[in-house]
Amino acid sequence: MDSAHGLGELIQRLRLYNAPPPSDDDGDGEDVDERGKVFSSLGLAETAAAAAADAPLLERFRPKRAAVLICLFEGDLGELRVILTKRSSNLSTHSGEVSLPGGKAEEGDKDDADTATREAKEEIGLDPSLVTVVALLEPFLSRHLLRVVPVVGILSDKQAFKPKLNANEVETIFDAPLEMFLKDQNRRSEEREWMGEKFLVHFFNFETGNKKFVIWGLTASILIHAASIVYQRPPSFPEQKPKYRIPHYVKGNCTMP
C-alpha cells in the first residue's frame, strides 16, 4: 500500500472475494460474554459423530450469530493497519484481553455487516458511514456453537474517525500492522489437543508507545486468515488447524448483501 489509489484497488479486489461455504475443516471460533461481546476465546466445532448422535435435538437448533469488524486503514508509511481493542479490566470475564470490535446479532440488524459496524460504533464510536464494507470472510464456530462472521471494512479517512470508547466495555483502542500476522516475528504458539486432534494456538506480542499487548487465540487466527487474503500469500509459519467437521445444521453460505 502506498497511496489512496492503492487503497481503492484493494477495495475493488476484496469486493470480488467470495468466501466458500464453510468446509469440514472449519474448527475454531470466538465466544461472547454476558454482554454479548465477542472475546478472544478458543472454540472448537462439534464433531459429525456427535451431531449424528443428537440429530433429533439438533435439527431444531440454530446457532446464535455474531460478527466482528476487521477495520483496515492506511498508516503513515503506507502500510495497512487494523483497529483492535483491549477489553475493560472491569469486565467479569476475559477482562483485559485483545479483541476485534464485535458481538452478537440483534433483532434489528439487517445482516452480519450491520452487526459488526453497529458494535464498532457502540464500543469505540466508529461511525458506520466512515467504513466501506468490502468482504465477509468464512464464519468461525465456537465450542458453544456461536457462529462468528469476520467483516472486512476499509476506513479511507482515518482522520475523520474520532474514537469515543465505551468505558464499560473497552479500556484501550490501538492499531497494528496487518502484515504482522503473516510473519514469524514476535510470535509463539502452543500446541493443544482436543478429541485426539492436535492444533496450534498463536500468540503475537505487540508493543506500541509504552503499552504491550498480546493478540492470541481466535482474534489472532481471524487476522492471520484476513492477512492471507489481503496479501495473497500464506503465513511464514505453520498454522496446524484442527480438522473437525462442522455439522450440517450449522453450515451456511457467507455472502455479501
Image: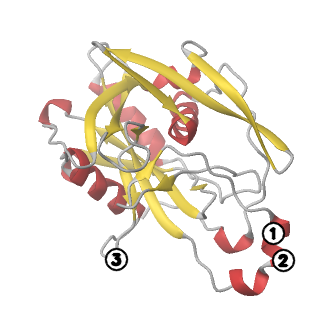
Quarter of the image for residue 155 reads top left
What is the secondary structure assignment of the residue under circle 3? loop
Q: Residues within 10 Å of mark 3 (few under 14, many from 20)?
A: few
Query: Where, by quadrant of the figure, is residue 160 drawn?
Result: top left
Q: Earlier in the sequence, mark 2 or mark 3?
A: 2
Mark 2: secondary structure: helix
Query: Is residue 189 visible from the viewing direction of this image?
Result: yes
Task: Give the residue pinned by disc 1.
Answer: 50
Could you say whether the residue bearing mark 1 is in a helix, strand or loop?
A: helix
> In this rendering, is residue 118 above or below 101?
below
Say which of marks 1 and 3 sits in front.
Answer: 1
Rate crowding at label 1 as few (under 14), some (14 to 19) or many (20 or more) other CA atoms within 10 Å: few
Q: Are marks 2 and 3 in contact (CB under 8 Å)?
A: no
Disc 2: CA contacts within 10 A as few (<14), some (14-19) or many (>=20): few
Mark 2 to mark 3 CA distance (whole Å): 31 Å
Q: Tag 3 or tag 1, which sits nearer the N-term? A: 1
Left or right of 186? Residue 9 is: left
Say which quadrant the N terminus sits in.
Answer: top left
Amino acid type of the residue that numbered disc 3 sits on in the rendered structure? Glu
Query: Which mark is nearer the camera, 2 or 3?
Result: 2
Q: Position of residue 55 (x, y in %)?
A: 78, 81
Distance of mark 1 from mark 2, alpha carbons?
5 Å
The residue that label 2 is drawn on is 53
In this rendering, does residue 254 appear at all?
Answer: no
Task: State the image coordinates of residue 58 (x, y, percent, origin top left).
Answer: 70, 80
21, above or below 151, in the image: below
Q: Is 208 rendered above or below residue 128?
A: above
Position of the C terminus by quadrant: bottom left
The kind of residue tagged 1 is: Ala
Label 3 sits on residue: 107
Amino acid type for the residue under numbered disc 2: Ala
